[in-house]
Amino acid sequence: MKKGRIEAFSDGVFAIIITIMVLELKVPHGEHLDALLPLLPVFLSYVLSFVYVGIYWNNHHHLFQASDKVTGAVLWANLHLLFWLSLFPFVTGWLGENHFAALPAAVYGVVLLMAALAYWVLQMTLIAANGTDSVLKRALGRDWKGMISPVLYIAGIAASFWQAGLALAFYVGVALLWQIPDRRIEKTLR
């Protein structure tokens, strides 16, 4: 299979995820600014999840740009990642509707953690398909952001039962960490 098909399919799933998330934003009843206040938690959870989907979409694109071969195992690893990402609209809505309560914050963190682990599995599967001397393997190197992110998600999940605001700080922190562009693959491809 050519990698273009898996990229096009994945791009479509990313677009659908974003569309479903934005449809959860309800129009306020009222014409004054105070009508927006009850929607603030829903909007903020949407913004955080939109950033996460954008990060995954960007990095997914780079992974496949650095890969030449796609195998059946890569297809399944990619579907595994897309499964966890497809849960973002649900957990985003639940988190926002419940004003960042403990259990929704913990479940949100679990989905973030599982998406991160699924992304790692996809990376490893692509490396296996393309070889340990591949451009992708050389580009990824030690991947310190990929190693620290699950630790921060676990800390956020644990913190959610003690202080949900702290859990969200961990989740925002990981998003900020990944907002700094990861140029390893771009540099290696040049």
Image (cartoon, helix red, strand yellow):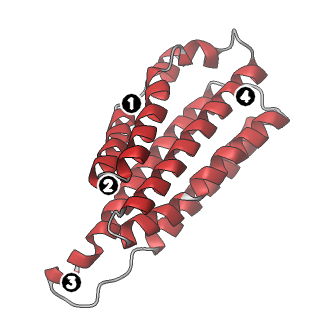
SS for dot 2: helix
- What number is the disc on residue 35? 3
Which of the marked residues, 4 or 1, is nearer the chain's N terminus?
4
Mark 2 highlights which residue? 164
Type of amino acid at the residue the image marks with label 4: Thr
| Residue 34 horizontal side relative to residue 159, left or right | left
Between the C-alphas of marks 4 and 2, the distance is 35 Å
The residue lying toward the viewer, choosing from 142 and 152, is: 152
Mark 4 highlights which residue? 125
Rate crowding at label 2 as few (under 14), some (14 to 19) or many (20 or more) other CA atoms within 10 Å.
Answer: many
Q: Position of residue 137 (x, y in %)?
A: 62, 16
Q: Nearer the viewer, mark 1 or mark 2?
A: 2
Which of the marked residues, 3 or 2, is nearer the chain's N terminus?
3
Q: Nearer the viewer, mark 4 or mark 2?
A: 2
For the residues labelled 4 and 3, say whether their Cβ atoms are less than 8 Å apart. no
For the residues labelled 1 and 2, say whether their Cβ atoms are less than 8 Å apart. no
Which of the marked residues, 4 or 3, is nearer the chain's N terminus?
3
The residue lying toward the viewer, choosing from 46 and 99, is: 99
Mark 1 highlights which residue? 181
- Identify whether 165 is placed above or below 38: above
Name the image quarter holding residue 71: top right
The residue lying toward the viewer, choosing from 64 and 157, is: 157
Between the C-alphas of marks 3 and 1, the distance is 36 Å
